[in-house]
Amino acid sequence: MKKQVCLLLGLSAVFAVSAQEKGKSKKQVEKANFRVQIFQKVDSTEIILADPDPEFQEKLPISAVIRDSSKVSLTDMPQAAKIDSVWRAELTNSDLYETIQKSIAEQDYDEVVYDELPTDTLKARLARLNARTPFNIEYNPSLESVIKMYLKRNKQAMERLMALSDYYFPMFEQELDKYDIPLEIKYLAIVESALNPRAKSRVGATGLWQFMFTTGKMHDLNVSSYVDERMDPVKATEAAAKYLSTLYKVFGDWDLVLASYNSGPGNVSKAIRRSGGSTDYWSMRRYLPRETAGYVPAFLATLYIFEYADEHNFQPKRPEIPYFQTDTIQVKELLTFDHISKVTGVNKELLQFLNPSYKLDIIPFVEDKNYVVRLPRTKTGAFVNNEAAIYQYAEQEIANRQKPLPKYIETEDRIRYRVRSGDYLGRIAQKYGVGVSSIKRWNNIRGNNIRVGQYLTIYPRKPVANTQSATASSSAKTTTKGDTKLYTVKQGDSLWSISKKFPGVTVQNLRTWNDMSSTRLKPGMKIKVSKG
């Protein structure tokens, strides 16, 4: 009997082991199928797996596009999914700029009652700030009224700015430190633009640091039909740091640097003369333009509120993706935000926030220009590993577009305008975003009369197409055979980059003229770039 029991137990164990091995085998087959389905899936049927392989699952969005982007449902990236709709609204909101500018322009400096901040407490805190910063933050009633007004009326706006500052300030501090500029200058961007990289003033100043068109050109911030580098947070911050450093060499006083950044060194030097030679900001403030008179107090009030945010119980939302968790990749061919969003799963709104300098949500590819896309770090590796497939996908999408994308056009900081029939100074001034008096001053015109055919020199505030670069083809190597123009393909060329070299030529033209079923090119091959 005991022998029979032992035999039965032994057989049970064998069957149990066999079932367990069978279960393992089934699980292994399922995982193998998962890998095959990722790279061979060509329909939109959803794959549901109990235990997916995370290494391969991470590659699904881009790998799927390689096969057939039109038939595959792309999954969202986990990091972007964490960013809720409230935070996206904060990133793309622009009304903070108007709020801050209005508070500066309408500041009346009357006494503001705010019992939560006694004057003695404020004096003590300002004294501590004054001791550890190079700015003159000594107490005065005007500054007290601004601080209390901000606390009383602008608390919600300040919380939103604090949320945005978590993204921008690490980058600001890094750039400011390079030029030995006080890190507190980072608060200047709040006063200038409310941390909106696409902010534009009524006179055309643009970006986080509010560069005018011509001033931006002076600091290598270029503008084209696709790109406005004044809206590039990194480039604009570096330009602002250089400019601020130059201003400090002139004035040797950071309060005067702030005033001159806003109104220009000329207005500050006039105010010094009118005040009898005083270089103390508070003594000369009434001789400055009204906007500048409220500018430095707004800066100091912002500095105080941010430094004592905890004491005033500010509770801002924090960003899911700080600046240091992003990275850039230099683009090798034209890409749109739609392309990038489809292959990476990064939400388009987030792409717009991370890449604000691209005016049309298009990243162009231009020889001798280094345009980059900024992405969350979690997506940069997958993007680089699949670059060839991404560009091929983008090129096919562009080739199949019914309406071609706008051409890349450089802009100029000075133009020669030829007066046409029906022109008058007001019309020309409106076209280029300048004043009539400015046009008259630039061209030594005393009255209001201009004649047809007359040339005018204009420094536009609005970007203007550089007609030379818009019409001239690049230094492409071309030959002519009969009525047909041929182009010799170079390393790195694509149909899109070649089409941009020849005005009026599209990718579809090139494919039709050369009877091309594929978009792949080989260096040295000759293709038709004209109909013939």
Image: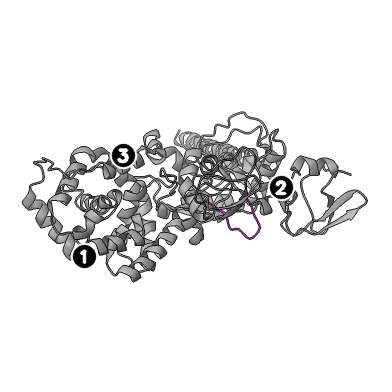
Q: Measure the alpha-carbon separation of dots 1 and 3.
A: 35 Å
Q: Measure the alpha-carbon separation of dots 2 and 3.
A: 43 Å
Label 1 element class: loop
Residue type for callout 1 = Gly
Q: Residue furthest right?
A: 482
329 shown above or below 131: above
Check residue 276 in the rendering and tell me which mark sits there, or answer none. Answer: 1
Left or right: where does residue 510 sit relative to residue 94? right
364 shown above or below 171: above
- Please identify the quarter of the rendering in which residue 15 is found: top right
Disc 3 packing (10 Å; few <14; some 14–19; many ≥20): few
Residue type for callout 3 = Thr
Task: Between label 1 and label 2, give the one nearer the viewer.
Answer: 1
312 or 324, which lies in front? 312
| Residue found at x 52% / y 48% | 379
Left or right: where does residue 223 sit relative to residue 95? right
Q: Main secondary structure of the magenta part?
A: loop
Is residue 372 part of the magenta span, yes or no? yes
Task: State the extent of the magenta-drawn residues as a range.
Answer: 365-374
170 shown above or below 58: below
Does residue 167 appear in the picture of this structure? yes
372 or 61, which lies in front? 372
Disc 1 packing (10 Å; few <14; some 14–19; many ≥20): few
Does residue 376 appear in the picture of this structure? no
Q: How far across and down, in percent of the image, does residue 1 sit?
A: 45, 33
Q: How far across and down, in percent of the image, does residue 431 sit?
A: 54, 42
Task: Between label 1 and label 3, give the one nearer the viewer.
Answer: 1
Check residue 496 in the rendering and tell me which mark sits there, or answer none. Answer: 2
Left or right: where does residue 483 sit relative to residue 319? right
Residue type for callout 2 = Trp
Q: Residue furthest top?
A: 45
Label 3 element class: helix
